[in-house]
Image (cartoon, coloured by chain):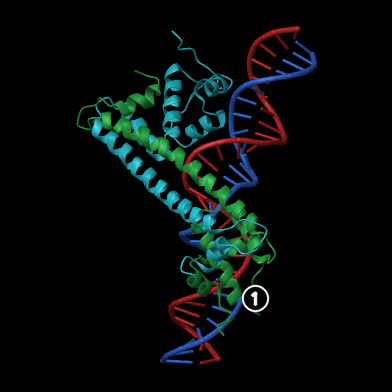
Chain colours: A cyan, B green, C red, D blue
Amino acid sequence: MSAASVTIGEAARATGVSAKMIRYYEETGLLGPAGRTAAGYRVYSEGDLHALRFVRRARDLGFSMREIADLLALWQDRSRASAAVKAVALDHVADLRRRIGELEAMARTLEHLAERCCGDERPDCPILDDLAGGPNTG
Amino acid sequence: MSAASVTIGEAARATGVSAKMIRYYEETGLLGPAGRTAAGYRVYSEGDLHALRFVRRARDLGFSMREIADLLALWQDRSRASAAVKAVALDHVADLRRRIGELEAMARTLEHLAERCCGDERPDCPILDDLAGGPNTG
DNA sequence: CCTTGACCTTCCCATGATGGGAAGCCCCAA
DNA sequence: TTGGGGCTTCCCATCATGGGAAGGTCAAGG
């Protein structure tokens, strides 16, 4: 029913992907070239919007464009093995967990240092001491 | 004693900051201009190396260059209030915690989806279903 | 003295995903 | 016909980092 062709602005509003990014995805080959009106305006079908929402959701989950390209290919391949999809997802989870670990270590270190910093008008500061001397100082 | 002037390559090895980044820090004003030999080679004193190690440590803790500029200024200001340093540190911790939360949410969502994906040779895949239909599907 | 190789200099380009903005064309409604 | 808003392409910026080219410099060894 609603297979109307919409312009890039309407597609952006309908999918939450900015017009800028829609053009970028096309330019980099993540998405195929959009249809065009006689005047050169891009047009998007309901199927195109579906793909855009797919990309949007994957971005929200932190997948890189490279990974999204893989996921899109799997999505469009009716005979894919779910194992392939799961592998991409779990690789990404491992990456997320690694990054979380790194940020956690930073946060904990800083929290420890901040705890020991009285935080008043005096200049003495274990935080600066650590930065100046590295973790092995003292 | 060891106040020898070293070249940028030696400074890089001594501090763990690449020569590229040392030049970049100078170019952007994070660090003052390095001394130069008659031939135009940059030279670094023991004090310069100390500042480079400070920057390196701060980068390891995830501070942005903007924040590091603030921290360097505080470090060099003998009359700073430790409260100012603590504020910068705690702002950064809050930022780290926010990012950790975002990554955690992504990881948990994907883990839930992956759990429900049998991950065999069959094409049915709740992960793709979620991406295609969004979190409200089903 | 000259060569060789390691090092230094500056300059340009790329990353990944995104936004800003300018110049110019197009379309619809009044 | 005019005005305003939307579309096009093109260029630039972000943030921190690396790669590489073209050319100058320095120290060691023949």
Is the N terminus of chain A in the top left, top right, bottom left or bottom right quadrant? Answer: top left
* Depth check, front residue: A112 or B68: A112
Question: Image quarter for residue B82?
Answer: bottom right
Q: Is residue A63 visible?
A: no
Point out the residue furthest to the left here. Answer: B121
Describe residue B98's horizontal placement relative to residue B82 as left or right: left
- Seen at 46% across and 28% down, the residue is A33
Q: Which residue is mark 1?
A: B36
Residue B75, placed above or below residue A3: below
Q: How many marks?
A: 1
* Depth check, front residue: A55 or A3: A55
Residue B2, placed above or below residue B48: below
- Seen at 56% across and 76% down, the residue is B7
Residue B56, placed above or below residue A34: below
Q: Is residue B63 visible?
A: yes
Q: Position of residue A76 (x, y in %)?
A: 33, 26
Q: Position of residue C21 (x, y in %)?
A: 70, 36
Secondary structure at badge 1 equals strand
- Seen at 42% across and 19% down, the residue is A47
Residue B14, placed above or below residue A78: below
Q: Amino acid at mark 1?
A: Arg
Q: Disc 1: which chain?
A: B
* Depth check, front residue: A130 or A62: A130
